Image (cartoon, helix red, strand yellow):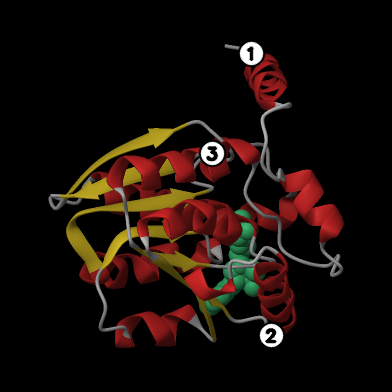
């Protein structure tokens, strides 16, 4: 399969569809130095998953400038839900907050500024959907914590799970092993039913049985 051709075809199909796309979101964002955000196809998939499951409580790990958060919040607000999102870089968090306000979505989003490794073990809530998009080195370490705060029937969705087979720049090579370890944790976990889907940089979707 020619994935570049497939990607172009899909992009073309969705080009004229309403809604803010990644390129426009980034161009409206003042801060230019941030970790890359999800692709439009992953944003569409997240929105679809929220609609299918009517998820009300969402946990996102890794906010950056808030593109994925904003995409999800547009749907979550229809169900009276809320997103808790975690970011430890104060500068990008401030930009994300501003973007949420600009989009009129701030009341549907709780932004927690700090290290996900300290915040998640202290969360008392349970979530319908967890979107994992933090530093890839932390995926394995946070796996069990995510399982604990995920409701039965809830979804765990993680981005960049095809890093082990993508042609990555040398600076990202240290992320291959933890992502591979995380994929194996998800796939071999008896509490989860999962599938790894080749969109974006690879998205694994798992439901807690
Ligand atoms: C890939 S970006 C998130 C992109 C965002 N989900 C989107 O698509 O719009 C990952 C973010 O995780 C943040 N991060 C890395 N390690 C973290 C940690 N230990 N706790 C909280 N946030 C962290 C980084 O600062 C970065 O902004």
Which of the two discs, 1 and 2, labels the residue nearer the N terminus? 1
Whether residue 143 is visible: yes
The image quadrant of residue 140 is bottom left
Circle 3 Cα neighbour tier, 10 Å, few/some/many (<14 / 14–19 / ≥20) = some
Q: Secondary structure at mark 2?
A: helix
Which numbered circle lies on residue 175? none
Residue 176 position, x and y percent, is 54, 51
Residue 166 position, x and y percent, is 61, 37
Which of the two discs, 2 and 3, labels the residue nearer the N terminus? 3
Residue at numbered disc 1: 2
Q: Secondary structure at mark 1?
A: loop
Q: Secondary structure at mark 3?
A: helix
Which residue corresponds to the image point at 55% horizontal and 67% vertical from the top-left?
62
Q: Nearer the viewer, mark 3 or mark 1?
A: 3
Residue at numbered disc 3: 44
Q: Nearer the viewer, mark 1 or mark 2?
A: 2
Q: Nearer the viewer, mark 2 or mark 3?
A: 3
Which of the two discs, 3 and 1, labels the residue nearer the N terminus? 1
Ligand 1 placement by image quarter: bottom right
Circle 2 Cα neighbour tier, 10 Å, few/some/many (<14 / 14–19 / ≥20) = few
Residue at numbered disc 2: 90
Which residue corresponds to the image point at 67% horizontal and 81% vertical from the top-left?
89
Q: Is residue 172 above or below residue 164?
A: below
Q: CA distance from mark 1 to mark 2?
A: 40 Å
């Amino acid at each position: 399969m020619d994935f570049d051709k497939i990607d172009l075809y899909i992009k073309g199909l969705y080009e004229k569809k309403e809604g803010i796309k990644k390129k426009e979101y980034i161009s409206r964002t003042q801060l230019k130095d941030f970790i890359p955000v999800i692709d439009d196809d992953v944003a569409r998939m997240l929105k679809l998953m929220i609609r299918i499951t009517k998820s009300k409580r969402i946990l996102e790990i890794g906010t950056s400038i808030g593109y994925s958060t904003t995409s999800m919040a547009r749907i979550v607000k229809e169900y009276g839900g809320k997103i808790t999102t975690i970011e430890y870089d104060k500068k990008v968090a401030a930009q994300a907050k501003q973007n949420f306000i600009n989009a009129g979505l701030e009341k549907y989003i709780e932004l927690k500024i700090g290290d996900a490794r300290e915040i998640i073990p202290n969360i008392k809530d349970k979530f319908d959907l967890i979107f994992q998009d933090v530093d890839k080195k932390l995926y394995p370490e946070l796996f069990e914590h995510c399982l604990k705060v995920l409701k039965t029937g809830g979804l765990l969705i993680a981005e960049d799970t095809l890093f082990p087979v993508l042609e990555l720049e040398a600076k990202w090579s240290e992320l291959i092993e933890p992502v591979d370890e995380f994929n194996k944790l998800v796939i071999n976990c008896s509490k989860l039913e999962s599938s790894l889907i080749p969109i974006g940089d690879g998205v694994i979707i798992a439901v807690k049985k």
